[in-house]
Amino acid sequence: MNALRKQAFKLREQVAKQQQAIIKQFSARGYESSEVMVIDEIEMQTHHQLENLYRSTRSRRDFQKELVKTAEAFSDVGYKHIEAGEYMQISSSDVNLHESTSCCREINFIKCSLLVKRPRT
């Protein structure tokens, strides 16, 4: 145990000497102490964290907007299919009445396609 304590004490002294040497080196460059450098480094890390948070938030917001647009597009397509299906049911009853003429069937399909292309109100 005693040997471990002596070794730990020596390591602490070496670290303290190295820290003092670094402080002197920075103070020779115009820094008053290494605390200024540490604060700048902490501020820089905080700045990078904030930038990363902003980027991730922005990308998630954009992703959410894309999801909403996609959902709206799917619902619009679904409504168009429902409208077309309802129109096809109506037109199929008309076709049953007028099965003898193929012209009437073509007109119904044209009406249905126009209904699908028409914007909803």
Image (cartoon, rainbow, N blue to C red):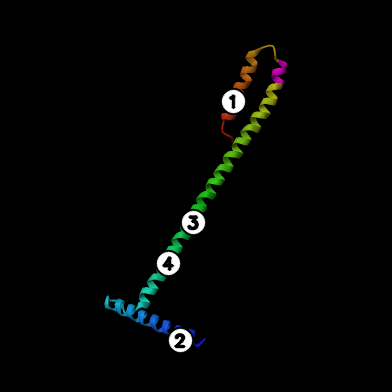
- Which residue, given by chain and number where applicable, does mark 3 sit on? 56
Q: Secondary structure at mark 4?
A: helix
First in sequence, mark 4 or 3: give its number.
Answer: 4
Query: Badge 4 local density, few (<14 within 10 Å), some, or many (20+)?
Result: few
Seen from the viewer's position, the closer of residues 79 and 11 is 11
Query: Badge 1 local density, few (<14 within 10 Å), some, or many (20+)?
Result: few
User: How far across and how far down the image is residue 63, in percent?
Assistant: 52, 49
Disc 2 to disc 4, how far (Cα)? 36 Å
Of badges 1 and 3, the one in the foreground is 3
Of badges 2 and 1, the one in the foreground is 2
Query: Badge 3 local density, few (<14 within 10 Å), some, or many (20+)?
Result: few
Disc 2 to disc 1, how far (Cα)? 91 Å
- Which residue, given by chain and number where applicable, does mark 4 sit on? 45
Of badges 1 and 4, the one in the foreground is 4
First in sequence, mark 2 or 1: give its number.
Answer: 2
Indicate the quadrant where residue 79 lies.
top right
First in sequence, mark 1 or 4: give its number.
Answer: 4
Residue 61 vertical placement versus 71 (above, below): below
* Boundaries of the magenta span: 93-97
Disc 1 to disc 3, how far (Cα)? 43 Å
